[in-house]
Image (cartoon, grey):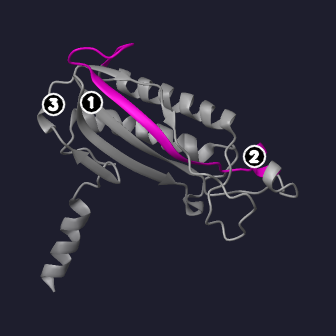
Amino acid sequence: MRKPLLLSLALFALPALAFDQAQVMQPAALSNVQSVYVAPVAVELPAAARRFDRRGDAPRPVAPRDAETKAADLTTALRRGFAKDFNVVDAAGPGVLVVEATLTRLEASRPTMADYHREPGLGFESVYAGGAAMDVRLSRDGADIAVLKDRYTGNFGDGLPRVGVWQDTDRAFTRWSRQLPSWVAHPQTASR
């Protein structure tokens, strides 16, 4: 009886992974990082279904303008997050860690104009569990160091109202702007 209890306590004591997937090719290259260049975030979203999918399995549409705006928001959040512990520079150079993030999914918490265009009868009071997903490539001096992937999806059980259109997406950006600099500073011990 004691062994299962000890095992369950040990599992709770272990730190959670900072990202859903982390592949580190050159761990030594992450030591002594002082300067970071955050490249503008790229966008590679899956194609949305042409017709409304009542099951909700297919990605909802995202207007190109919204995608560009959210990519700029994530770039700003990452730069702000790295600026707390690192010297953020305006261009890649020798010894500079280059952070290249790509948004692979955007999910609004409320209907967007693209949703209304696809489904004209959609009510403005509709609420979704929004979120986002990103892939991050870290490189230094032209060599790939690590590839990270993460996805955040809001949860209706969190008790937070979904007032803003991109509220859960912005929450993901805030989370990543804390997690990524922490992971770079301590890749073995970084936790959520």
x and y percentages locating residue 43 in the rendered image:
53, 38
Locate residue 44 relative to residue 86 in the image: left or right. Answer: right
Place of residue 81 in the rendered image (x, y in percent of width and height, measured from the top left): 40, 28
Label 3 CA crowd tier, 10 Å (few <14, some 14–19, many 20+): some
Q: Residue at x 18, y 80 (%)?
A: 4
Q: Is residue 56 above or below residue 113?
A: below
Residue of label 1 = 139
Percent x, y of residue 84: 35, 23
- Give residue 83's position: percent from left, percent from top: 37, 21
Q: Kindly indicate the quadrant of the structure image that contains residue 113.
A: top right
3 and 2 marks in contact (CB < 8 Å): no
Report the residue at 76% width, 51% height from top.
115
* Residue located at (68% from left, 58% from top): 49
**Which of the pair 160/164 is nearer the observer?**
164
Amino acid type, residue under disc 1 in the picture: Ser
Label 3 sits on residue: 29
Q: Amino acid at mark 2?
A: Ala
Whether residue 131 is situated above or below residue 82 in the rendered picture: below
- Alpha-carbon span between mark 2 and mark 1: 35 Å
Q: Is residue 125 left or right of residue 189?
A: right
Q: Secondary structure at mark 2?
A: helix
Which residue: 39% across, 13% down? 90
Q: Which residue is mark 2?
A: 114
